[in-house]
Amino acid sequence: MQRLVSLEDLNDVFLLVSDTVYKDVFPVIGRLYEADSIVMGVYNARLAELLRFSPQPDVVRMFLLEYDFRNFKSFLKTRLAGLEIPRNGGSISGDTWERVLNDLKTDLPPFWSQAMALIRAEVKEDQPELTPAVIDLVLDAESLIQQVRIAGAIGYPIISKCAEAFRTVKAVEIIWRAKEGSYDMNRLRRLFIRDELDLPLLRELADLPLDSWADRLRPTLLGPLVDDVFSAPEAERVTSLTRRGENLVLDFAKAAKTVAFGPDRIYGYLCGLRTEVFNLRLVLAGKVNRISSRLLQARLRGQYV
């Protein structure tokens, strides 16, 4: 990945990609302009294959669930706010989302309809500008809650540790961004800080000004990141937190390399694959759009291998 980032000429980028496992999906240079959807297609195909053949399908479902929630958010924003956002991964059809939206029976677990009911109760006809933010808060919360629950049900320590760390990183990021955007903290507490996210740390961060966060985060699992995050320029701090936090989760997942077989091993592989896909999408989109190598390097996630 580092070599790919360093390349400036798009022909060189194509030649390097043509020498990887992605060579079959990039037969001509023009396909680089479709890299985002192509790479996601490869990722989803791998997840589908693992789901079909893995003796531990719940581990794979944790990763599919992340994209199912993204798709539901996109669907709702398209239907309720008139936005056109393409489907990107996941395992649930648009027809099923339509039934959830209209409170009709589906074969999905009940948390989908419960989340939709929470959105419906919060959004008022005279406040349409709230719709996208409410959708994001409710479904981002539900995604994190369900991943922690699945990890707990699987019952393996590496998976549970990573899921709880990922929950903390993403929840802190979401609250940070809400504060930067002067979002209503009472609404955030009601829609986001609930169930497995109703944690003392998150409640306190919602109450504290951002300039007091460093001291509160030091005694947490994010403590080792605090100095680097808060020494960054103010506009880059939340991005730094996200990148460093997700690298921390990946470091926890690397413990799965010492496991010979079982759910932890599959989870570690999928964490590494998710990071590879993120990095490849980032770099290829950056190269096509002539983003500087320095900016791309600053946003790369770590690597599993």
Image: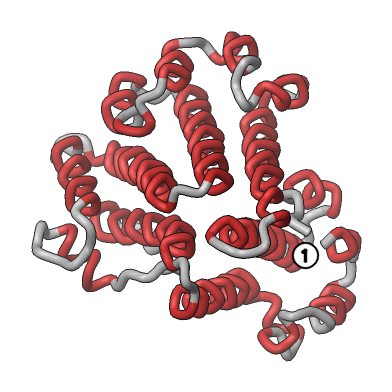
Asked which secondary structure carries label 1, the reply is helix
Question: Is residue 140 at least partly visible in the picture?
Answer: no
**Side (left or right) of 258 relative to 101:** right
Q: Residue, x 62% and y 73% (percent of image)?
A: 39
Q: Residue, x 12% and y 59% (percent of image)?
A: 102
Q: Amino acid at mark 1?
A: Lys
Is 27 placed above or below 122 here?
below
Front one among 221 and 205: 221
**Picture quadrant of residue 289:** bottom right
Front one among 49 and 18: 49
Q: Residue, x 30% and y 19% (percent of image)?
A: 186
Is 97 placed above or below 181 here?
below
The C terminus: image quadrant: bottom right
Front one among 290 and 171: 171
**Picture quadrant of residue 199:** top left
Which residue is denoted by mark 1 in the rendering? 287
Q: Position of residue 54 (x, y in %)?
A: 49, 74
**Side (left or right) of 253 relative to 291:** left
The N terminus: image quadrant: bottom right
**Picture quadrant of residue 93:** bottom left
> Crowdedness of circle 1 by 10 Å Cα count: few (<14), some, many (20+)?
many
**Side (left or right) of 35 relative to 302:** left
Front one among 214 and 85: 214
Is 223 placed above or below 22 here?
above
Question: Is residue 21 at least partly visible in the picture?
Answer: yes
Colouring = secondary structure
